[in-house]
């Protein structure tokens, strides 16, 4: 019986201690996170920038030579 009383006391203390946490969490869930959209846009810009750098590295000389040939033949 003593273990059951100890368990009940622990459950009671836990619920008393955690009630403010859950109340605050429920209150804060009504407000959107303002930084989330900013982070998503920053990641998209970063990925586009990396893609542009990779494409210029791979095809930069070929595109430059193509434009030089066009200008030379014009």
Image (cartoon, rainbow, N blue to C red):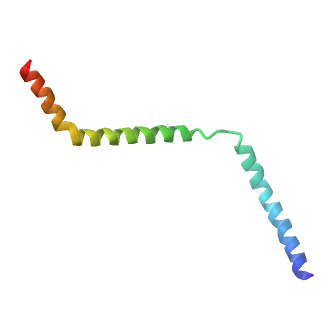
- Residue 35 x %, y %: 55, 40
Q: Which residue reaches farthest top?
A: 74
Left or right, residue 35 beside residue 57: right
Residue under the point 72% across and 49% down: 25
Q: Measured along the vertical axis of the image, is residue 24 above or below residue 6?
A: above
Q: Measured along the vertical axis of the image, is residue 52 above or below residue 66?
A: below
- Residue 38 x %, y %: 51, 38
Q: Which residue reaches farthest bottom?
A: 2
As rendered, which of 52 and 23 lies closer to the eye?
A: 52
Q: Which residue reaches farthest right?
A: 1
Q: How many marks?
A: 0
- Residue 29 x %, y %: 70, 44
Residue under the point 22% across and 42% down: 58
Q: Measured along the vertical axis of the image, is residue 22 above or below residue 73?
A: below
- Residue 47 x %, y %: 39, 42
Tell me where residue 59 sits by quadrant: top left
Left or right, residue 48 beside residue 54: right
As rendered, which of 1 and 50 lies closer to the eye?
A: 50
Quadrant including the C terminus: top left
Tell me where residue 2 sits by quadrant: bottom right
Residue under the point 89% across and 77% down: 4
Residue under the point 85% across and 74% down: 7
Quadrant including the N terminus: bottom right
């Amino acid at each position: 019986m003593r273990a059951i009383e100890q368990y009940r006391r622990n459950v009671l203390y836990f619920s008393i201690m955690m009630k403010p946490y859950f109340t605050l969490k429920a209150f804060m869930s009504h407000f959107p996170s303002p930084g989330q959209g900013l982070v998503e846009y920053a990641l998209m810009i970063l990925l586009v920038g990396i893609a542009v750098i990779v494409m210029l590295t791979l095809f930069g000389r070929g595109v430059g030579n193509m434009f030089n040939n066009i200008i030379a033949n014009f």
